[in-house]
Structure formats: structure tokens, C-alpha cells
Amino acid sequence: MTRTITTLRPAETVAFDHETLAELCETYGEEAEVFIATVLGEIEAHLTKADDEVKLGEHDGLARTCRNLVILAKSIGMRTLDTCANSVLACLASDDQSALSACTARLTRLGHPESFRAWTVGSPSGSVA
């Protein structure tokens, strides 16, 4: 008998907060796009680093990287990434290996290029538009 285990890779919408983006536009004016692009580049580098740290089991480094991801994500209103990185930090703090596996898998998925197509801007009420 052959047994096959299917790996689920759910698609996920990466939501941005509309109010935060509006504040950035008001603060930075024409330079808002440059600022956001710069932060997104830093996020991409941190997501790559986090993926490496997950594979190597470097929990201390992963915690530092996730703290940086939280700061960067909050700065541009990237709610989904903020929540995910905070979840990884909570798993590390509680030493919950099962939950850590699930949360780091989600973090890795959010860092894959195909997830970028699912980025949306949320409405001020917090729902996704």
C-alpha cells in the first residue's frame, strides 16, 4: 500500500493598513513611494534571513530577525507580516515547537514572490478591500 501525504500551501492575502499608507503619503509626499520601496527591500532581506535561520534552527537569530520584521512591517502598515512575525516570537518565547513549525512555515510563505501578487490595502475599518 502506498501512502501519500499532501503538503498544503494555502494562499494568503497580505494586507496593508490604509490609514498607515495614507499617513506615509501625507508625511513623505512624493517620496512616499521611495520610502515604502526601501522598507519593502529591507523586509525582503529579513524574510530571506529568517528562512535561513529557520532551516538552521538558529532561534536566537530568528527572534532578532522577527523583531526587526515587526518594526519594519508596522512602519508601512503591513498587518499580515506584523501578526505573523509576532506569532513566531510568541512561539519562541513559549518554546512551542509544533506551533513554531506552523508559524515559521507561514512566515516563509509570506516571503515567497508568489505571495506578493496577493497584497491588498485594507480599508480604515481594518477589513480588506
Image (spheres, grey):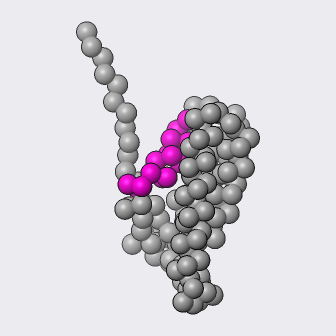
Residue at 59% x, 68% y: name it.
39
Q: Residue at x 37, y 62 (%)?
A: 117
Q: Nearer the viewer, residue 36 or 124?
A: 36
Direction top: furthest residue:
1
Residue pushed farthest left?
A: 1
92 over 4 or under it: above or below: below
Foreground residue among 16 and 46: 46
Q: Is residue 14 magenta?
A: no
Image quadrant where residue 119 sits = bottom left
Asked whether, in this view, residue 124 is left or right of residue 42, the answer is left
Is residue 90 visible to us here?
no
Percent position of residue 9, x then y: 38, 42
Whether 84 is drawn above or below 32: the answer is above
Q: Quadrant of residue 92?
A: top right
Q: Residue 31 at what x, y percent from top left?
A: 57, 85
Q: Residue at x 42, y 55 (%)?
A: 113
Q: Main secondary structure of the magenta part?
A: helix
Residue 121, image x and y in percent?
A: 44, 72
Across the whole image, how many numbered discs are drawn on residues? 0
At a point 64% along the width and 33% down the height, the residue shown is: 57
As displayed, is residue 77 above or below residue 7?
A: below
Side of 48 relative to 96 (left or right): left
- Percent position (x, y) of residue 30? 54, 89
The quadrant in which the C terminus is found is: bottom left
Q: Which region is colored magenta?
A: 101-115
